Image (cartoon, grey):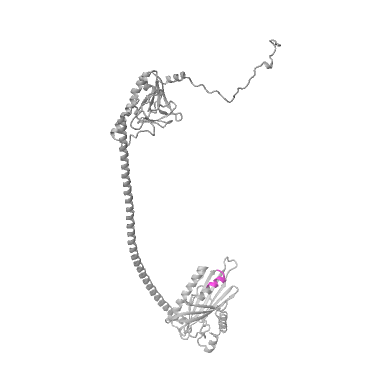
Amino acid sequence: MLSTSSGAAPSTSMLPRNLPPPYPDRRLPPRHPSCEDRSMATNDDQNKVIVVGLCKSVDDAGLKDMFDCFGAVAEAKVIVDEKKHTSCGYGFVTYTNAASKHKAIKHMHQKCVDGVVLTVKNAGVNADRPSISGGLGNCRTKTPKEGHTIKVEHGLGRTHDENDDDTVSETGHVYSENTRPNVATSDRSEADDDHHRGHTQDGADEGTAPCCPEDGERATRLEKDRMRKTKYRKQKMAQVDALKYEAQILEQRLEKLKADHSNHHKKARHSQGRGAMWQQICVAEAANKRDSLTEQQNLYRSLEEHLHLAVSLKRKMALANDVPLCFDPRGRPSEAYYAQHSLARHPVARVQSVHAMLDAQFHQLADTFVAKLPTADHDGTFGLVLHHDEISFLETIKFGVVYGRVVDVADVVWRHLLASRGPGTKVEMLDDDACFIQALQHIDSTDTPHHYIAKRYVEPGRQVLQSRNVLHDTLCPQQNPFKDHMVSWVVVEDMSHPQDKYPTTCIRGYSQTCLRSTRSASVQEYSVYMNDLTKRNDSLNSDLHRRFRCLVLN
């Protein structure tokens, strides 16, 4: 074997290797403390007491001053809440010897300090654990550790460990939530309360309290008595509830009967009141009707007086601008007039007669009566024409200006002209423009037939609406027995200006009415006719106002 010199470098094969540990992810478990270490830790806590019920203002120095009169204090510590930084209401005091500890427990336990009852107990590992007997089982106290938090109810000396569900009683004993004795039960007798308090105090002083057989029998007997009373109370409460429910049902029935009785009386009074109310309405309507009839009669009399006055004034004025009556049947040869102004029996000849009569009337308008059409609303509505100091015929004038087309306005006037002859009117259209009208008029307490013919002449920018009554009808000789004569013209023409925004239409009408052409009619008869004509004119005006915007309308 070759040897190397001391100055030579060692061979790489002879160097030690840095190998990884066989199990890199594993670590050795920590060493458990030995019995000697545990005994040393236990000896440090032999002389420690726990003080429960401290005020929030007591700190470590105050706690030490409170307990240093019983012996040398090695350490005094008040437990503080780490989050709130306030006292938890309890602390620990460690003495240098056991005699000082027992002396502090004897003199400070259940002592009132600053209005709060303190609970002072041994906090060592071998502390006594007193039990409570009372027929409800044994409950041992729990000594809280320094890391735990105990809630303290000041004034009652009750503590609660937030890390446990047990509760410390007024005497310092801890009761579980499931085994805590119900000392506030109303069924417990005073003797039972005294017995319970006595055992509790004995357990606090001696550390343990034996449960004798007599106490167990007494607790069992009291429990049975309490259960019996509870059952009896439940039965009575059930009976009371049943009676209350029955009383409520009876009250509801009574209220329903009262409501039905009240409704019955209300209906009776309402029916009686309705009868009286309708009777009052009937009486009021009858009075209104009588007043209306009286007013109508007064108006008729006033109209007659005004007509007489108008006739007298007309007679004195003797105006020469009066036009003659169109197709005046008076003073004419009866045969010639009858041939021109009567309707034939044959249907074809009948239609030809209607057109011939209305065409002749249209030519009369162009030749004679066009000047009688009004041009403004200041000529009045009615005019009288006299003959030998009597009324020859009555003139009626119609004037209006509305916003609307000629066709629309003429349609409204035409429909009203055909339907204004009173109830029971029948209209027979002979063609698109001509028609035959049958109407009934109440004269001398009888309904007599009257026949009318009408035709509409359509021209560019205007329409002419004509109507007249029939004096002679071969098919119905009894119609128009008094030979009333009426002719009318209504001219509806466009009067719009090129700059107008809306079309404007003018309505101009003129009519002649001769009542009782066979003889002169009285002023009263003309007043009745004027009243009926006024009603028809008001109906036409209402229809025009409802459909168009009317500027002038008489």
Place of residue 542 in the rendered image (x, y in percent of width and height, measured from the top left):
49, 70
Look at 31% across and 42% down and name the residue there: 233
Q: Residue furthest right?
A: 2
Quadrant (top left/top right/bottom left/bottom right) for the N terminus? top right
Indicate the position of residue 510 as horizontal and vertical percent values.
52, 77
Within the image, what quadrant is residue 461 found in?
A: bottom right
Residue 493 sits inside the magenta stretch: no
Q: Nearer the viewer, residue 301 or 387?
A: 301
Residue 50 seen from this side: yes
Residue 211 image point, x, y percent: 33, 29
Q: Quadrant of residue 146?
A: top left
Q: Position of residue 486 (x, y in %)?
A: 50, 81
Q: How many marks are shown on the rendered structure?
A: 0
Which quarter of the picture shows residue 92? top left
- Residue 93 against residue 244 in the figure, above or below: above
Does 8 sit left or right of 169 as displayed? Answer: right
- In the image, residue 322 above or below residue 497: below
Please indicate, yes or no, whether residue 186 appears anywhere in the rendered image. Answer: no
- Residue at x 33%, y 64% (from the top left corner): 268
| Viewer-closest of 225 and 292 | 225
Q: Nearer the viewer, residue 461 or 355?
A: 355
Dominant secondary structure of the magenta stretch?
A: helix
Span colored in magenta: 404-412
